[in-house]
Image: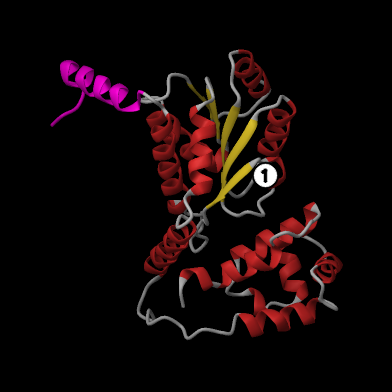
Amino acid sequence: MSVADSPANRLQALFEGRRLTPTQRRIAHCMVRRAADVPFLSSVELAELAGVSQPSVTRFAVALGFDGYPALRKHLREVAPAEPPPENGSYNEYQLAVEAEIENLRHLAELLADPRPVQEAGRILAASRPLPVLGLRAAASQAYGFAYFAAKVHPDVRLLNEGGTMIHDRIDAAVRAGATALLCFALPRHPREVVDTLAYAKDLGLTVVTVADSAFAPVAKHSDLLLPAAVGTGLAFDTACAPMLLGRVLLEAVCDDVPDAQARLEEFDAKAAARGLFVE
């Protein structure tokens, strides 16, 4: 099976173009994350996983054009038949988590076969002076990593990785200084503060580019351009190799649209060498 024909992609295609309510987006988000299991879940089990009521799952199935959830599940079993288990019976739980992340990276590679969304995001972010980069809680390290490297080529990167009452003030300051866009990293569990902050940024006229774990993440409705990269869920805490790599790919696209990016990198390297900053 190709990555393009994966269960997650088939589910994504089923939801694309639909006008979903917030509750329905939550169900869709859960289904994409658990794509391999969904055809075998009852409506009660899916409701528990998504944190919604069982009637909400039934209404969701009807909204997709099915008579009810059993009809939706029957359809999913037909278009996504059970696959033979991989030959990894001897793998321990740690190896299985790594294998799941490898699959997430394969999925990301397939999405990047069309580079236009990332290239568009790169142009939007490179043109914003300053460039605020938002990431709270689980996504704070993703935002920090992007901001750290972006600051080597972009003249004014402003990291927003701590929540609280000051975050709106810092966005206000960025807008006053000329910001036109905001980059957000959003990973589960999604803090309400991130959703509220993106809504505030949109109200101020900022273009919001978001790297999230799913196109149906709660931040989607406040994002002008959302770039999805799945997280791993096999360990006690989610793993985020694919979102991290997508952040680096996006950083490459930003570099392509910052006119003097190479000169800035060379200047940094020269100063670092003069200061003996790194051990060779």
Vertically, is 104 above or below 261?
below
Residue 47 screen position, x and y as percent: 76, 67
Is 262 one of the magenta-colored residues? yes
Q: Amino acid at mark 1?
A: Val
Q: Is residue 41 left or right of residue 179?
A: right
Foreground of the two, 52 or 268: 268
Q: Is residue 79 left or right of residue 72?
A: left
> Callout 1: few (<14), some (14-19), or many (20+) C-alpha neighbours within 10 Å?
many
Q: Is 267 situated left or right of 10 in this image?
A: left
The region drawn magenta spans 260-280
Q: Residue at x 46, y 73 (%)?
A: 2
Does dot 1 land on a helix, a strand or a loop?
A: loop
Q: Residue at x 69, y 68 (%)?
A: 14
Task: Establish if 188 lies above or below 169.
Answer: below
* Residue to which mark 1 is pinned: 219
* Position of residue 229 measured from the top left corner of the image (x, y, whole percent): 52, 53
Rendered view: 98 above or below 185: below
